[in-house]
Amino acid sequence: MVMTRRGLLLASAATLLSPRASALAGPRKPNIIVIYADDLGYGDVGCYGSKTIQTPNLDRLAARGTRFVNAYSTSATCTPSRYSLLTGDYAWRASGTQILPGDAPAIIRPGRFTLPSMLKQAGYATGVVGKWHLGLGDGKVDWNGEIAPGPLDIGFDYGFYMPATLDRVPTVLIENRRVVNLDPADPIRVDYKAKVGDEPTGFDNPDLLKFRGDPEHSNTIHNGISRIGYMTGGKAARWTDEDLTDVLLGKAVEFVTARKGAPFFLYFAMNEPHVPRAPHPRFVGKSGMGPRGDTIVQLDWTVGELVRKLEELGVADDTMIVFSSDNGPILFDGYEDQAVEKAGDHRMAGPYRSGKYAIYEGGTRVPMIVTWPGNARAGHVSQAMLSHVDLLASLAGLVGQPLPADQAVDSFDLRAAFLGQSEKGRDHVVQDTKLMVTTGTTVASSGARILALRAGDWKFIRGSVEPHEFHGNQIGTLPRHQLYNLARDPGERDDVAAKVPDRTRQMAAWLDKIERDGRSRR
């Protein structure tokens, strides 16, 4: 009697639970989809306690799998979180891993061991759709020619992506190595220091805007929205914000459809609810909380549509989905879109303090859901502490691939915890952010690294600089060390560093050692 593919996978469940298991039994490995939201907070999702924003598709995903309440992005900002997710290294170990401008060089260099390159070695077709924001090229990018290095040089077979963020130029999409729909007669020029061309800007033409931006977000206007940086040309190639999510979903569906007969890995890096928030008209007003809430409803719908497509293709039961967010939430982030005014009683970070840019829990504790029918524990709420940096080692263990000794140096194989079959996760996690400063009309990272260490119930924040706020979020920096007991004080309001000096010194020394050793995986 020949077992079905699902039967073989179920039969291998016991093997999966063993941390020493080197590979899956069965005819092929599971498809893997990582869905990475952008600035989605712990409290923005129904199954994490939101009473205002409805997320039925994410709630359904959680009911089918395991929901984590102690999951962390590595950083409170996007570029370093994505770097850690793909490399298995804390981004603060490398230079140049702050929030990148739209014309930055690639910070993950060709030949680097990465999550997609590891899965490619294991026989996976690999693709990225959505936000990139890890730099492109070697410096000055020629947007009118072949763009490299990029995703295809670090393990992805296919890419359809934004160069950086919604609020940065160039506002075009790249497929593999070339800008999509580019007219050679209308070449693109981009500059982040001086104006190029004669297109209107938010500074000079506020009457053309759908909503105003702050000085940082008041450069070239496209689609009624002023952006960071200056751009001219490429008009036929520019996206329409309201349609962008549908375009990206379509490419994600194309990718999984074309590769349904063999194992695939899709990194689906969504935009929502990052600024500028311009949801499709069919979602406008659906949340009652303005554009930010409406884009979260749009995100939820998009996840539901992708899952529905997997079911239609007959591969849903053979697909592992990891859903999470790159960092914590923020209301005002450069645009006057009424996010603050319409927030009401909504607690976007749940019980945690602050959000994006902050070293407090709201900056890096994020929603995370893992599903894989018959393998990931269904309807389970896990207390295991996990970090996105662990995804590389855990998936390598799952598909039977070794890790080079000098790569993925902070990534732990916690596959049993990821599948909800063990509550044993990390014993510690390092969190990071970088101090943001304003100079004239430019906002950028100062390079001042801020690190924190969580171990068990204790959270230590290393003393660094004077108290600082950025876009309304308390960053959490002080010239002295801070210590919080998260079990008693999840909102990090009662600093007990002076009351428990021995523990404060112990955690400070531990964090120093992690930094000094250059790795945490043994």
Image: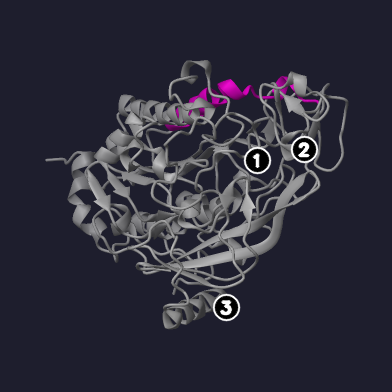
Residue to which mark 3 is pinned: 516
Give the Cα separation between the discs numbered 3 and 2.
37 Å
Q: Is residue 52 left or right of residue 433?
A: left
Q: Residue at x 46, y 53 (%)?
A: 353
Distance between the Cα atoms at labels 2 and 1? 12 Å
Left or right: where 511 falls relative to 440 = left
In the rendered structure, the answer to whether residue 461 lies left or right of residue 109 reads left
Q: Is residue 239 magenta?
A: yes
Q: Front-most of 284 and 346?
A: 346
Crowd rating for badge 1 (residues with CA inside 10 Å; few <14, some 14–19, many 20+)? many
Q: Secondary structure at mark 3?
A: helix
Q: Answer with mark 3 or mark 2, whichever residue precedes in sequence.
A: 2
* Residue at numbered disc 1: 164
Identity, as a three-letter code, of the amino acid under mark 3: Arg
Q: Amino acid at mark 1?
A: Ala
Rendered-image quadrant of the C terminus: bottom left
